[in-house]
Amino acid sequence: MSNSVGPFALRNNLKFLFSPLPGQMRPVDGLRAISILLVLAIHCVWILAVFDEGAAQFFYQAPFWLNWVFNGELGVDVFFVISGFLITSILMGEYQSSGGIRFGHFYKRRFMRLMPAYLLAMGFGLLLLPNGEYIWSNLLYINNLMPASTHFMPWTWSLAIEEQFYFLFPLLLLWVLRRRSVRFLGVAMTIAVVASLLIRYLVIKHYQLPLPICWYENACEGFFEVIDHIYVKPWTRFGSFLPGIFAAYFHVYHREALRDCFLKYRKPIA
């Protein structure tokens, strides 16, 4: 089956849900499960809050040790970590074996993995959701750059960030890898981490966003300002990809050293 037709083969794709490919990483699947559960937890609270305001109060008054359970943002961040790891592993592996990156092949695969299901979802969205006139922003994956009040299928902001990452990151990665300098790579990683933290701080300070940041519409004033300025923007979210990118570097270039380290220091569980 060709790569172009494969994403539309429903029967073939359903088979992979129950019979994973041989090279599929089970730890990554475990992280996916955790992130999905976190996202489901917070959305269940939101749905309950529509019928009972006490549910929202329970969310915001939860003890510290329970906060992570209801932190849907953390679940999305885990998705971004996984994307950073998988995409970087693919690109670094290709560069290591061939000395280059086939951008056309990479972009085609990313497009076809998502677009068939995305088009189907947008078709249903046009029948049921407001702001259908802004569907073009979803088709171009720039819906997260639009004002929150105009979002069509608002929850697809994370897909836009991922596609923006897929488009820009391979170009940046190729530039870094061609420098052939571990020191330069370390400097680039350090700058990226510092920049991700500094940008979020400056955005929160400049727009005077409420802290702690409110993720429920009726919980505080300025909810849509939070969405517009920090929650859905790529420049405040790229830091979530960095742990996955760093892990991919060690996975591709220092796999044996990592395996030896884990074997040396692992402890049996009684």
Image (cartoon, helix red, strand yellow):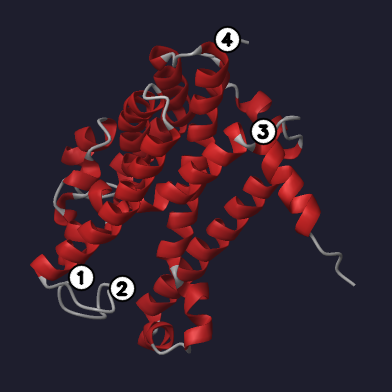
Type of amino acid at the residue the image marks with label 2:
Tyr
Crowding near the residue tagged with mark 4, few <14, some 14–19, many ≥20 C-alpha atoms within 10 Å? few
Give residue 143's quadrant in the image. top left
Q: CA distance from mark 1 to mark 3?
A: 39 Å
Task: Pinpoint residue 16: horizontal percent, then vertical percent.
Answer: 70, 32
Q: Is tag 3's residue or tag 2's residue first in the polypeptide sequence?
A: 3
Query: In the figure, 182 relative to 267: above or below?
Result: above
Q: Please tell me the numbered disc located at residue 2.
A: 4
Give residue 159's quadrant in the image. top left
Question: Quick one: which residue is furthest to the right in this view?
Answer: 270
Q: CA distance from mark 3 to mark 2?
A: 35 Å
Q: CA distance from mark 4 to mark 3?
A: 17 Å
Secondary structure type for disc 1: helix
Query: In the figure, 105 relative to 235: above or below?
Result: above
Tell me if I can see residue 151 in this picture: yes
Type of amino acid at the residue the image marks with label 1:
Phe
Residue behind mark 3: 14
Q: Do the numbered discs 3 and 2 sit on residues whose CB atoms are within 8 Å? A: no
Q: Is tag 1's residue or tag 3's residue first in the polypeptide sequence?
A: 3
Q: Do the numbered discs 1 and 2 sit on residues whose CB atoms are within 8 Å? A: yes
Residue behind mark 2: 216
